[in-house]
Image (cartoon, helix red, strand yellow):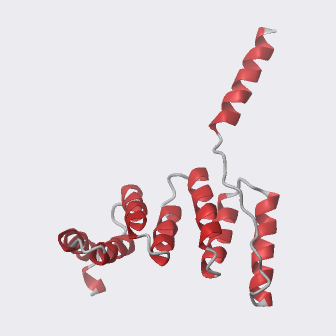
Amino acid sequence: MIRGLLCGLVVAQVIAAEPILLPIVLPDLSGMHASVQEQLRESYAVLLQSERDVEAHGELGKLFMAAKHLDMAERCFRNAQMLAPHDFRWPYYLGHLFISSGELTKAVEHFERVLRLRPIDFATRVWLGYVYIELGQLPVADAVLTKALALGPDST
C-alpha cells in the first residue's frame, strides 16, 4: 500500500515537473505558395508526432517566422525554451522575432538571456548593440559593441 502511494507520488512529481507547453496550430495557409504550405504541414506533422521534441518546435518556429506568422513562431520558440532552458538558440530566435515585431525591449531581454547562457557570443552582442541604438541608449550600445569588438576584432 505505502509502496503504491510512493510510486504514485513519484509519478505525480515527474508529471508536475514537465512544463506546460503553449498550443500550436496551423494558421490559414491558403495565401501561401504551395511549397511553403507543404513545408509548414510537414513540420507541423513532425511536431504532432512528438510534442515534446525541442527541435520540432524550433524548426516549426523558424518556418513560421519566415512566413511572417510571428505569433505562432513565438509560441514554438517559447516551447523550445521551456523544454531546453539552457539552449541559447531559442532566446536568440525570440530576440530576432521581437526585432521583427518592433518590440525592442523584449528583444533586449532575450538577447541578454543569450549572453547569460553564452557570454562570449559575438553575434548576439552585435544585435544587442543594434537594438540599444534603436532604443536611443547610446552609452549602453557603445559598451555592448566595444565588448563585441574585443571578442571579434577581425569582424570590422
Which residue is nearer to you in this view: 64 or 30? 30
146, above or below 155, in the image: above
Which residue is nearer to you in this view: 57 or 20? 20
Residue 110 x, y percent position in the rendering: 43, 62
Which residue is nearer to you in this view: 127 or 156? 127
Q: Residue most toward the top?
A: 1
Residue under the point 61% across and 80% down? 68
Residue under the point 82% across and 59% down? 49
Residue 147 x, y percent position in the rendering: 23, 70
Quadrant where the N terminus sits is top right
82, above or below 102, in the image: above
Residue 24 x, y percent position in the rendering: 72, 61
Q: Is residue 54 left or right of residue 120?
A: right
Q: Residue most toward the left?
A: 139
Which residue is nearer to you in this view: 146 or 96? 96
Q: Is residue 121 left or right of residue 13?
A: left
